[in-house]
Image (tube, grey):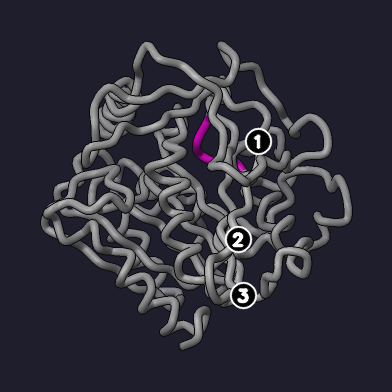
């Protein structure tokens, strides 16, 4: 328990580092529109302490601030079409932020810029944070669904919507994956292992689609281990778990490199195709902004992996 208290405190430090006195409403880049993922009120909606707010950090990362969005109660997705040749692949991008904020540029729009430049449709998810009382451990027991994490409901719904609109968005429904950072990386693991759990009542025809990712990329993920160092039971890895690409730094002192190590070990035991890259330096929450640390070039390795597993063709 002490370890989790320390980690949560570090998340609080990270979240507070984003704060500034300047506020604004987050908007996607020009030419793109946020689309509500629920036709009405989101299921299991809980109160938040204030209206949705976006803030620019005072601290700069690679010369730029970070946009932090919090108090999200109306989850949305924003679709970014690929530039140049369309590979047919699509990726739902899940920003991190310790389930307190969403780093919508560092771990959102900037990831979309990379993906679309490679001919991949990017679907940026703005999921619910925070939800109080919030329990990040998803209770997915069939007869106790009221405790399911609202964020995971949002991810499931978004995956189904992408497949439902596949023809309209020129997407191959068999090439829909997920990419998430930090807490978003945990949600990547959750959707990869809990895709067939019924976490909300069906609302329309889109909910007949599969929520299973065809591939998954958790980047510096958190919450994947318990206090005893074992795999979090809320990510029940099986042979049906999505093929996975993992990246983490050994000096990540927010979540710890054991997050990726334990998850990768479970994937290997289940014979799930997986690739893991560990780096000596890089820390946490670097996104795709290039620094002197080689880990910030991880996207190049991810591109090779996507070719290797047949998602992107030469």
Left or right for 265, reference 203: left
Q: Say if residue 3 shows up in the picture.
A: yes
Q: Residues within 10 Å of mark 1 (few under 14, many from 20)?
A: many
- SS state under label 3: loop
Q: Split into 4 quadrants, where in the image is the N terminus?
A: top left
Whole-percent x, y for residue 40 in the image: 83, 33
- The residue singled out by tag 1 in the image is 75
The answer to if 218 sits in the magenta stretch is no
What is the distance, in whole Å, between disc 1 and disc 3 at their CAs? 25 Å
Q: Say if residue 133 shows up in the picture.
A: no
Left or right for 201, reference 292: right
- The residue singled out by tag 3 in the image is 88
Mark closer to the chain start, 2 or 3: 2
- SS state under label 2: loop
Residue at x-position 62% and y-position 46%: 31
Residue at x-position 30% and y-position 28%: 14
Residue at x-position 35% and y-position 19%: 19
Q: Nearer the viewer, mark 2 or mark 1?
A: 2
Residue furthest to the bottom in view is 314
Q: Residues within 10 Å of mark 3 (few under 14, many from 20)?
A: many
> Which segment is the magenta one?
135-139
Q: Which mark is residue 81?
A: 2
**Could you say which is closer to the camera, residue 2 or residue 309?**
309
**Could you say which is closer to the camera, residue 67 or residue 187?**
67
């Amino acid at each position: 328990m002490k370890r989790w208290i320390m980690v949560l405190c570090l998340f609080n430090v990270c979240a507070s580092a984003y704060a500034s006195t300047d506020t604004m409403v987050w908007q996607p880049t020009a030419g793109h529109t946020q689309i509500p993922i629920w036709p009405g009120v989101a299921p299991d909606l809980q109160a938040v302490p204030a209206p949705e707010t976006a803030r620019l950090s005072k601290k700069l990362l690679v010369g730029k601030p970070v946009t932090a969005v919090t108090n999200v109660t109306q989850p949305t997705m924003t679709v970014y079409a690929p530039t140049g040749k369309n590979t047919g692949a699509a990726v739902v991008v899940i920003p991190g932020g310790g389930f307190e904020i969403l780093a919508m540029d560092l771990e959102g729009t900037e990831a979309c810029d990379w993906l679309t430049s490679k001919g991949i449709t990017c679907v940026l998810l703005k999921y619910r944070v925070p939800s109080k009382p919030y329990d990040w451990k998803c209770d997915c027991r069939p007869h106790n669904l009221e405790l399911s994490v609202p964020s995971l409901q949002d991810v499931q719904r978004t995956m189904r919507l992408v497949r439902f609109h596949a023809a309209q968005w020129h997407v191959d429904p068999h090439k829909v994956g997920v990419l998430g950072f930090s807490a978003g990386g945990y949600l990547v693991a959750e959707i990869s292992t809990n895709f067939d759990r019924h976490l909300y009542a069906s609302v329309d025809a889109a909910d007949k689609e599969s929520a299973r990712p065809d591939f998954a990329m958790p980047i510096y993920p958190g919450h994947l281990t318990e206090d005893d160092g074992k795999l979090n039971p809320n990510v029940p890895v099986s042979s049906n778990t999505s093929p996975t690409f993992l990246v983490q730094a050994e000096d990540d002192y927010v979540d710890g490199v054991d997050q990726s190590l334990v998850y990768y070990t479970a994937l290997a035991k289940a014979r799930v195709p997986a690739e893991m890259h560990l780096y000596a330096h890089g820390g946490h929450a670097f996104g795709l902004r290039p620094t002197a640390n080689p880990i910030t070039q991880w996207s190049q390795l991810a591109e090779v992996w996507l070719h290797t597993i047949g998602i992107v063709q030469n």
